């Protein structure tokens, strides 16, 4: 590598910022870091689940200009149009070009409701904060009509190729609690319909058991292995010929890559094929793809952090001529909001190669596979929602340094008491 290597990071989300800030923490001035993003704000997407219930979407945003300036990271606002890995050039939509020695592609995922005819027209979908505001409008309608004595049905739908079903599970539980608290639950029939073989399939049998129990306790009709193919104004139709009627449909559409990179090997959804441990793009030694943009089958902010750490560590090891010994270790962690309580899960997963069930809990994970439900876990969720934006607005990585060590101790202490 040249004396002062140029690292170019594309994206302004979890994976991009974590990589850029962690690299800068390790290398004060011996690398040039440039970050290109189409927005000059970071969106803390996990807390957008609160928007349907009244949270202000602006409260989820962190302005990027100040923290990037503070860390001497050159910021370029623009949309990346093309990456030419052979000539090491990135071209923006306005024609501007940047060269690099190391490229980090962290442009994330997008959803594609259009894959299921009728879904965009007849359902409310979750993804952007605007779409969450539309869900809010529908939930308020459900509440108001129920209070006026009208019976209604709300159908929640996870179609095939959605790669992050957890947030929709949070929203169904939150809606159930919210309706109860608003004296509007009795006249609302809530049904859950997913293509998965188990509820929150990626997180294994313990989450499936927990959700099954919660659905039963809350009077939610949960249904597995329902492959949606079409949506009309009144019903969802399925591959086996069945259908489900609804008054309101709330869906989390299939995932695709936010940006396609024809110069790099990718899967059929545009996610770049990577080496698991380093997040290097297949066949490349200078292009990394942490976070949702890569082909790891579960798309999650916590996994994006771990992948970004691996990328920063790999670049750091190369710069120092040291051995790379901290590969990405796919141990997922999440806290699932329900309003009256929350569920914590720590799940070591491994890839199976089976598209129908692309990950499973690592055999022998035993004590490392932890699940717990308690109102106290809501505090953990709040802590994460506070500390990630705070760290990024200070120009610091989230998953490193003393702040993370303190948080890690807190989570471990909580999980030793409130999860097993
Ligand atoms: C409702 C909801 C709730 C969620 N809750 C959780 C949770 O509780 N826990 C959890 O771990 N995960 C959660 N997730 C998943 C999590 O948000 C994603 O996995 C995470 O955002 C992925 O991070 P990323 O950096 O890879 O991509 P993103 O955060 O999507 O960032 C991509 C970045 O690239 C930029 N970009 C895109 N295209 C271009 C372009 N052409 N040029 C330049 N820049 C571009 C975007 O503006 C953005 O800044 C949730 C997701 C949703 C939708």
Image (cartoon, rainbow, N blue to C red):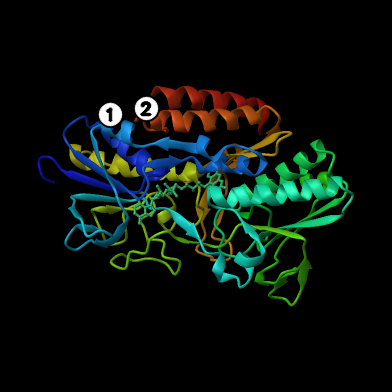
Q: Position of residue 356 (x, y in %)?
A: 58, 65
Q: Is mark 1 within 8 Å of ligand 1?
A: no
Give the residue drawn at x 37%, y 38%. Answer: 18
Give the residue drawn at x 67%, y 28%. Answer: 418
Q: Which residue is mark 1?
A: 70
Badge 1, how many Cα within 10 Å: few under 14, some, many 20+?
A: few
The answer to which quarter of the image holds residue 191 is bottom right
Give the residue drawn at x 13%, y 40%. Answer: 4
Q: Position of residue 388 (x, y in %)?
A: 46, 32
In the depicted structure, whether residue 161 falls above or below residue 75: below
Q: Is residue 76 left or right of residue 344?
A: left
Quick one: 330 or 295, which is closer to the camera? 295
Give the residue drawn at x 42%, y 32%. Answer: 398
Q: Which residue is mark 2?
A: 394
Badge 2, how many Cα within 10 Å: few under 14, some, many 20+?
A: some
The answer to which quarter of the image holds residue 163 is bottom right
In the depicted structure, whether residue 295 falls above or below residue 408: below
């Amino acid at each position: 590598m040249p004396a002062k290597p140029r690292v170019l990071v594309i994206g302004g989300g979890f994976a991009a910022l974590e990589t850029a800030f962690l690299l800068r923490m390790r290398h004060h001035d011996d690398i040039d870091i440039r970050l290109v993003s189409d927005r000059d704000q970071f969106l803390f997407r996990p807390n957008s689940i609160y928007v349907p219930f009244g949270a202000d979407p602006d409260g989820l945003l962190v302005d990027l200009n100040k923290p990037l300036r503070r860390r001497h990271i050159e910021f370029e606002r623009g949309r990346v149009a093309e990456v030419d890995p052979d000539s090491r050039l990135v071209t923006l939509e306005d024609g501007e070009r940047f060269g690099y020695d190391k490229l980090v592609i962290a442009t994330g995922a997008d959803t594609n409701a259009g894959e299921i005819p009728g879904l965009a027209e007849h359902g409310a979908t979750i993804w952007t904060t605007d779409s969450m505001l539309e869900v809010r409008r529908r939930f308020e309608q459900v509440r108001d009509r129920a209070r006026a004595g009208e019976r209604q049905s709300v159908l929640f739908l996870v179609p095939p190729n959605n790669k992050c079903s957890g947030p929709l599970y949070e929203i169904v539980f939150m809606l159930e609690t919210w309706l109860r608290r608003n004296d509007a639950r009795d006249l609302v029939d809530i049904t859950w319909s997913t293509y998965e073989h188990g509820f929150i399939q990626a997180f294994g049998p313990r989450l499936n058991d927990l959700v099954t129990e919660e659905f039963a306790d809350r009077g939610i009709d949960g249904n597995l292995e329902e492959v949606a193919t079409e949506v009309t104004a009144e019903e969802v139709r399925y591959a086996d010929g069945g259908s489900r009627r609804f008054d309101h449909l709330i869906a989390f559409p299939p995932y695709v890559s936010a940006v396609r990179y024809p110069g790099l090997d990718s899967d059929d959804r545009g996610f770049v094929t990577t080496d698991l441990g380093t997040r290097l793009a297949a066949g490349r030694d200078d292009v990394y793809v942490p976070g949702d943009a890569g082909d790891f089958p579960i798309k999650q902010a916590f996994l994006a952090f771990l992948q970004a750490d691996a990328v920063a560590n790999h670049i750091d090891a190369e710069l120092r001529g040291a051995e790379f010994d901290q590969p990405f270790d796919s141990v997922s962690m999440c806290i699932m909001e329900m309003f009256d309580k929350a569920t914590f899960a720590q799940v070591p997963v491994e890839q199976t190669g089976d598209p129908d069930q692309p990950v499973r809990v690592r055999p022998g994970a035993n004590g490392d596979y932890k699940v717990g439900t308690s109102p106290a876990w809501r505090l953990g969720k709040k802590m994460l929602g506070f500390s990630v934006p705070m760290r990024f607005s200070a120009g610091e990585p989230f998953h490193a340094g003393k702040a993370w060590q303190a948080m890690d101790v807190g989570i471990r202490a909580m999980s030793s008491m409130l999860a097993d």
